[in-house]
Image (tube, rainbow, N blue to C red):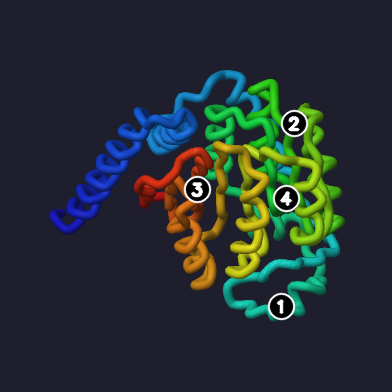
Amino acid sequence: MKNRLIPRIKKKGRKFKENISLYALTFDSNPQVRKLAKALIFIKNKKNWEKEEKSCFNVINELREQYSSSKRALKIRDYGAGNPNSQRTLSEMEIGVEFEKQISEIYKVAASPKKWGELIFKIIREVKPQKILELGTSLGISAAYQITALKLNRQGEFISIEGSNEVAKIAAQNLVKVGYKNFTVKTGKFKDVLPEILVRDANIDMVFIDGHHDKVATKEYFEMLYPHLAENSILIFDDINWSPGMQQVWKEIYSDERINVSFDLHKWGICHIDKKKKGGKRKYFKLSP
């Protein structure tokens, strides 16, 4: 009995300390940090969703059911690192690896779980970004949460990049069901499409990097994006513990002097940037997922 209680007590203790740290950030001098902390507190504790938010989640859940049961096979060209054991070469990632996969299998591996979808949804509801960029659309589940939040905010533009043409088409067709017009799904390699977007779109408020999963590429995207980010902006990195390389690049990024506040949620790394802030101690918080 005692052996079973100790882990529970420790878990509750960690949660209490995390809540104290997040609560302190709700008094931060930066309004965006306060809102980000508020979103994290909401998700980590009792979630009291508004009626219209619950209704929007129903649409996304219908998409989930549709994808999870679909046996339709798609031709995929993957420019990413594959899986942690793939050991793809730079030339393979440059050319792309082709294969066929059923939509249900893609959904099982690539779709954002509900807890993470709800987190990015809540962040957008709180922060109310005007321009969001996503690297890695896949079937569009995470995009659906983001577009839905913009819809309820009644403002904001969403752009997503997907490497595989057939997957991008499926995502774009189904994202229409959300009922928000101000979104675009672009197809191609991140490094090719990203410069085209950044030339046109400055002052990007929020970026979700959910693809490639390569140490060198992730750092390159960070450097490409930084000059085009708004003075106050949020970067979310998916799968920061996906591989030793991703662990290393996440440490490099959250240790960077340009990062104001960072949150390590084991799966996601969330960074806040305040370009006006000069010097001062960087704040890093390790939170239970």
Give the residue drawn at x 50%, y 52%. 268
Q: Could you tell me if residue 64 is visible in this image? A: no
Write down the residue under mark 4. 137
Residue 105 x, y percent position in the rendering = 70, 60
Q: Amino acid at mark 3?
A: Ile
Of the image marks 4 and 1, the number of the one nearer the N terminus: 1
Of the image marks 3 and 1, the number of the one nearer the N terminus: 1
Residue 166 x, y percent position in the rendering = 86, 56
CB atoms of marks 2 and 3 within 8 Å? no
Q: Which mark is residue 238?
A: none
Q: What distance separates the C-alpha of mark 2 from that of mark 3?
A: 26 Å
- Residue 165, by quadrant, is bottom right
CB atoms of marks 4 and 2 within 8 Å? no
Q: What distance separates the C-alpha of mark 3 from that of mark 1?
A: 27 Å
Q: Is residue 209 above or below residue 152?
A: below
Of the image marks 2 and 3, the number of the one nearer the N terminus: 2
Give the residue drawn at x 66%, y 51%. 225
Image side of residue 133 versus residue 289, left or right? right
Q: Could you tell me if residue 78 is visible in this image? A: yes
Secondary-structure class at tag 2: helix
Write down the residue under mark 2. 178
Write down the residue under mark 1. 90
Which residue is at the far top?
51
Secondary-structure class at tag 1: helix
Closer to viewer: mark 4 or mark 2: 4
Image side of residue 60 versus residue 27, left or right? right
Closer to viewer: mark 2 or mark 1: 1
Q: What distance separates the C-alpha of mark 4 from that of mark 1?
A: 22 Å
Write down the residue under mark 3. 270
Q: Amino acid at mark 4?
A: Thr
Q: Amino acid at mark 2?
A: Val
